[in-house]
Amino acid sequence: MFLKFNNAEIGYQQPLIRNVNCGLERGEVVLLIGDNGSGKTTLFKSILNSVPLRGGGIFLDNANISRLSRKEIAKKAAAVLSRGAIPAHLAARDLVAFGRFIHYPYYFKISEDDNEMVERILIDLGLKKYSYTPLRQLSDGNLQKAFIGRALAQNSPAIILDEPTAHLDEKNKLMILKLLRRLAQENSKAILLSSHDWRLAMHFADRIWLISNREISESRPDDFFNKFPELKLDISQL
C-alpha cells in the first residue's frame, strides 16, 4: 500500500474517526464520503501531518509521516484542500508553477521541462487562455482548477483532494473526474478524494470509504448500496 493507516485515531480534542486501518494503492482512485463534520477534511490534514494523530500511524510509501518533513511529505502526496488567502499579484500560471517548488532549493528558476509540464497542465484543465489572468479575476471554477493544477504540477505519487468538483459546472466536474481516473490508470497515481457529488464521483472510483459512527467502512461502488442498506444515507448531507 502506498498510503496506509495503522490503527489511526483522527481528531482534535475528541476523536472523529477511530480504528482506521485502510490503505490506498498506486493506480487506484478511492472516494471518501461521510456526513458534514464527520472528519473527512481532518483525515486529509492528518495525512499531511498538519493535524497530528491522536494515536496509531499513517505511512506514505512505507515511511511514517511523523518522521517526515513537510517537503518530504509533499514529494509523496500533493493536496488540494480549502483555499487560503489568494495572492493578488499571482496569475493562474504562477499558481500551477508553484507545484514545482518542492523539487528545488528555496531560490530557483524552473527548467524548460518544468515549463512544458505547466503548459500541458494548463491545456488539460482548460486554463490555457487564462494563463496570465490574475487569480482574483478568475471565476470560482477556474480558480479551483488552478489549485488542482498546482497539485498536478507537484507530480507526487499520491494526490488527495477535498471536494475537487466544488464550484465547477457539470462539464468541468466530469472533466476533472475523468482526468483523475486517467492519472491513476496511466501514471500510476494513488488518488483519494471527497466529493459532495459522490453519486457522480463513485463511477470513477475503484473503492469507497464511508465514515459512519466514527469508523471507516469500505466497499466497491457496484456493491455500495447492497453492503450498507442499513445506514439509510441522507444524500443531502453527503
Image: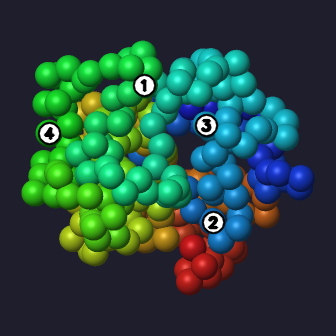
Q: Nearer the viewer, residue 143 or 197?
A: 143
Task: State the CA–CA distance, disc 3 to disc 2.
Answer: 20 Å
Q: Of the two numbered discs 1 and 4 on the same chain, state the one appearing first in sequence.
A: 1
Return the residue at label 1: 102
Please determine whether, in this image, residue 50 is positioned above or below residue 91: above
Task: State the CA–CA distance, disc 3 to disc 1.
Answer: 14 Å
Return the residue at label 3: 48
Identity of the residue drawn at 64% across and 20% down = 68
Amino acid at pointer 4: Glu
Amino acid at pointer 1: Ile
Q: Nearer the viewer, mark 3 or mark 1?
A: 1
Identity of the residue drawn at 49% across and 70% down = 196
Q: Nearer the viewer, residue 6 or 169?
A: 169
Q: Nearer the viewer, residue 176 or 144?
A: 144
Q: Position of residue 142 (x, y in %)?
A: 27, 63
In the rendered picture of this protein, how many numbered marks are placed on residues?
Answer: 4
Return the residue at label 2: 34
Question: Residue 119 has which mark?
Answer: 4
Q: Of the two numbered discs 4 and 3 on the same chain, state the one appearing first in sequence.
A: 3
